[in-house]
Image (cartoon, coloured by chain):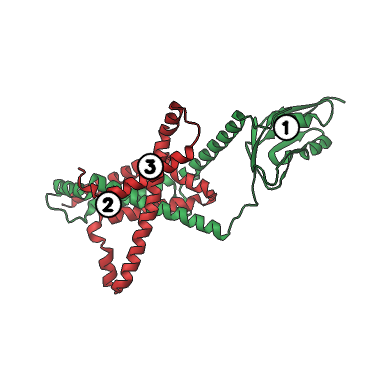
Chain colours: A red, B green
């Protein structure tokens, strides 16, 4: 039994190593965080951003892999946080999570589209010269509308 | 007057803080004749308009022309870039509140963004189901969801990212730059190339007359 457990641990370790290699190569290849740092002129803080990436991944990992053991609301209740206060704090946490992960996902989606050069190629094909700003706005609105509609109509129920 | 060679090495990207730009701000200069070297370094190459564009591209040919104008018999050798991007920047703010807000913003986006990414990935592959079944295959009993497999997976993930990013907190594992620092430089170089080429295409480069 112990031997099997050791085998299992070795397997788990290699799964984890390979997952991080895969996920982070994609994240880095699209160069999202350098872009953020460049836009805000805070390139000197790159190591801090890397730390945040590491911490974020680990937090997300624990919350999703050990989901049944991470009942934040119950923990808060047991710690004696008043229900009303927790509603506010939890709501704040949810809004933070939603907003910032939304920004990240939105940028990621556009960065991937850009990495594949789909937008420049398309623009060149149709001889697109002006109105790139309008096109970008339309794309952002389209994404927002699509996301809203997806949740509003509970489309996640139809997927496989 | 005998032939004197002035060597100039223009930078690719020069950030200047004053509206008057001298040759020494955008290029390194050397020459066997000290007087000519000093004169060349103090040559005014460009004047930014207070309300105009904050950045412009100057061709090395224009710099050569200016240095040659110092006197007869001066030969100029360019050992640096062909075009220089000059940017007028305010003295960089290093610790103002705005900087902290920006840093906090990018940190929050990085933290929650990657947390969401890994959660979405786990959700996509149905990791709890997968691990539960795998546990059963290996151990022959039902998984409680909190086993050696999940724990070692999390450890492996942590080790993997740390190796990948090459540092733990402020401490580097090897002396190489981290991947984000490398990407940062690549991105900056791409931006400079684009600006220089755009200026060239729009014929806005300050060239030899």
Residue B82, quarter of the rendered image: top right
Measuring from the top left, give residue A77's x and y in whole percent.
27, 71
- Sequence-first disc among 2 and 3: 3
Q: Please tell me how crowded label 1 is: few (under 14), some (14-19), or many (20+) other residues with Cα within 10 Å.
A: many
Disc 3: host chain: A
Residue A23, quarter of the rendered image: top left
Question: Tag 1's secondary structure?
Answer: helix
Circles 1, 3 touching at the beta carbon (< 8 Å): no
Question: Tag 2's secondary structure?
Answer: helix
Measuring from the top left, give residue A126's x and y in whole percent.
43, 27
**Residue A3 in sight here:** no
Camera-near label (2 vs 1) is: 2
* Residue at mark 1: B63
Q: Please tell me how crowded label 2 is: few (under 14), some (14-19), or many (20+) other residues with Cα within 10 Å.
A: few
Disc 2: host chain: A
Residue visible at 55% across and 60% down in the picture: B97
Q: Is residue A124 above or below residue A151?
A: above
Measuring from the top left, give residue A81's x and y in whole percent.
31, 73
Measuring from the top left, give residue A70's x and y in whole percent.
26, 61
* Residue at mark 3: A109
Q: Nearer the viewer, residue B87 or A72?
A: B87
Residue visible at 55% across and 49% down in the picture: A41
* Residue at mark 2: A152
């Amino acid at each position: 039994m112990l031997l099997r457990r050791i085998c299992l641990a070795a397997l788990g370790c290699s799964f984890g190593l390979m997952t991080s290699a895969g996920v982070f190569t994609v994240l880095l290849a699209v160069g999202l965080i350098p872009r953020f740092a460049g836009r805000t002129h805070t390139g000197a803080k790159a190591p801090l951003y890397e730390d945040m990436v590491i911490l974020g991944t680990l937090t997300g990992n624990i919350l999703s892999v050990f989901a049944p053991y991470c009942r934040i609301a119950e923990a808060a209740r047991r710690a004696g946080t008043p229900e009303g206060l927790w509603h506010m704090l939890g709501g704040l946490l949810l809004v933070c999570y939603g907003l910032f992960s939304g920004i990240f996902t939105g940028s990621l989606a556009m960065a991937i589209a850009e990495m594949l050069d789909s937008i420049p190629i398309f623009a060149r094909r149709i001889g697109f010269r002006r109105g790139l700003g309008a096109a970008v706005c339309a794309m952002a609105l389209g994404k927002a509308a699509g996301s809203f509609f997806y949740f509003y109509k509970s489309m996640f129920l139809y997927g496989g | 007057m005998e032939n004197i060679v002035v060597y100039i090495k223009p930078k690719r990207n020069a950030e200047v803080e004053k509206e008057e730009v001298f040759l020494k701000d955008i290029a390194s200069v050397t020459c066997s004749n000290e007087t000519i070297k000093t004169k060349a370094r103090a040559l005014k190459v460009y004047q930014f308009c207070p309300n105009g564009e904050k950045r412009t591209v100057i061709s090395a040919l224009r710099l050569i022309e200016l240095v040659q104008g110092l006197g007869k018999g001066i030969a100029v050798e360019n050992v640096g870039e062909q075009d220089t991007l000059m940017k007028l920047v305010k003295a960089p703010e290093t610790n103002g509140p705005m900087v902290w807000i920006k840093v906090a913003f990018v940190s929050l986006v990085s933290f929650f963004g990657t947390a969401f990414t890994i959660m979405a990935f786990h959700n996509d592959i149905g990791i709890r189901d997968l691990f539960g079944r795998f546990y059963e295959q290996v151990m022959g009993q039902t998984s409680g969801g909190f086993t050696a497999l999940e724990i070692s997976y999390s450890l492996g993930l942590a080790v993997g990212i740390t190796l990948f990013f090459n540092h733990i907190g402020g401490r580097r594992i090897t002396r190489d730059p981290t991947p984000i620092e490398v990407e940062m430089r690549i991105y900056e170089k791409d931006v400079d190339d684009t600006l220089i080429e755009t200026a060239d295409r729009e014929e806005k480069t300050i060239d030899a007359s």
